[in-house]
Amino acid sequence: MSKTPASDSTQQLGENAPVEISIVTPMHNEELCIREFHARLSGVLEQMDLNYEIVLVNDGSTDSTEQIMRELSAADPHLKCVMLSRNRGQCTAIYAGLQSSTGEYVVIMDGDLQHRPEEIPALYAECRKGFDLVSGTREKRTESLVLRRLPSLIANYLMRATSKCDCHDMGGMSILRGETARSLQLSEGQHRLLPALVHISGGAISEVLIQAPERFAGASHYGIARSVDVLFDIIMLWFQTSFKQRPLYLFGRLSLVLFGLASLTILWLLYEKLALGVHMGTRPPFLGAILLYIASLAFMSTGFTLEILGNIRDGVLGKKPYRIREIVQSKK
């Protein structure tokens, strides 16, 4: 009886078996890191003995990153290279990679080796316990205290307070269930909020401690301006999660507060006019009350408008305000 060569059986497994784990990594000008990243990542995944795919997304690189990706892809059938037409940013690159993935589980990690491929088995084992997302919480970080670590601590604290998600490191390496990853509708900057977004939708979250080494090579793409972007992301997250995700609740209450202040001012002015004979029509408090009435009407109109737009968006996307964890049904 003839035996199938090992290489042939491996190729058959890769072609026919479902993908158990996908690795999604955005690449922007990572020519100094990409070969080492691919070698270490492939070694880890081979040892895990899973059917896997590596999805690298070229985010409009201007160095030789794309050429190296093509060379690696020609030699590695597990490698899928997604080339974006131009630089769209890390979040868009991650989103494109998620939508191109097919794995039962999906790992999101950077390509500069500050996210170590050797951490994947621990994240995978934790996620298989039934979690929708497992975040790698970085310990003993070596980046600048002022430029990276302190802003990260503040941002993560604010995101936990806003979303009520207990994850301590929102923007690090993470693994998600494939169906959860591909169902995400990410807007720019929301790759930093993945645990919060999954938690808000009803998903189960866990954490695993991981190491945080320095970059393998090259320069970081992050600057202090990123902290400002994160602040706006947190404000948007607060808005999306406040008042049961109903804009009308938020703007309606603000409208009522302004209306109440305006009405109290008018009542005070009327009392002074009727009791004391003080003219009210040209006084600054009267003009201020009119402005408060106008602002109240504007806030209420904004709430109605956002409510309608939100309903239209959810209808188009088929979005549901819940996630079913389990259906229990007796078998007769």
Image: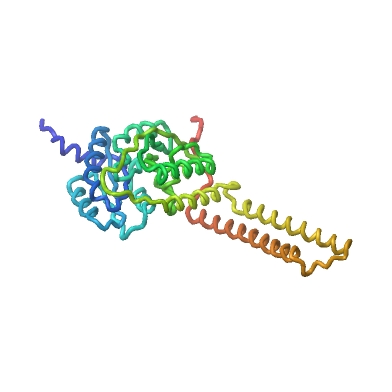
In this picture the colour scheme is rainbow
| Total residue callouts | 0
> How far from the left and from the top, in percent, is residue 262?
74, 59
Q: Is residue 205 left or right of residue 248?
A: left
Q: Is residue 201 visible?
A: no
Question: In the rendered image, which quarter contains the N terminus?
Answer: top left
Q: What is the x, y in percent for residue 128?
A: 38, 33
Give the residue at the far right of this rendering: 275
From the top left corner, tell me how far across and down residue 24 is, in percent: 32, 45
Q: Is residue 301 visible?
A: yes
- Quarter assignment of residue 305: bottom right
Q: Nearer the viewer, residue 228 or 122?
A: 228
Of residues 225 and 270, the one nearer the viewer is 225
Can you say whether 323 is above or below 306 in the image?
above
Q: Position of residue 303 (x, y in %)?
A: 61, 57
Q: Is residue 246 above or below residue 214?
A: below
In this rendering, position of residue 174 left or right of residue 256: left
Q: Residue at x 51, y 48 (%)?
A: 320
Q: Quadrant of residue 298?
A: bottom right
In-front residue for pair 141/260: 141
Q: Nearer the viewer, residue 117 or 307?
A: 117
Which residue does the image show at 25% across and 41% down from the upper left?
Answer: 16
Work out which residue is located at the far left of the displayed protein and give it: 2
* Residue for point 16% across, 39% down: 8
Tell me if 301 is positioned left or right of 60 in this view: right
Q: For residue 268, what is the image quadrant?
A: bottom right
Residue located at (43% from left, 48% from top): 184
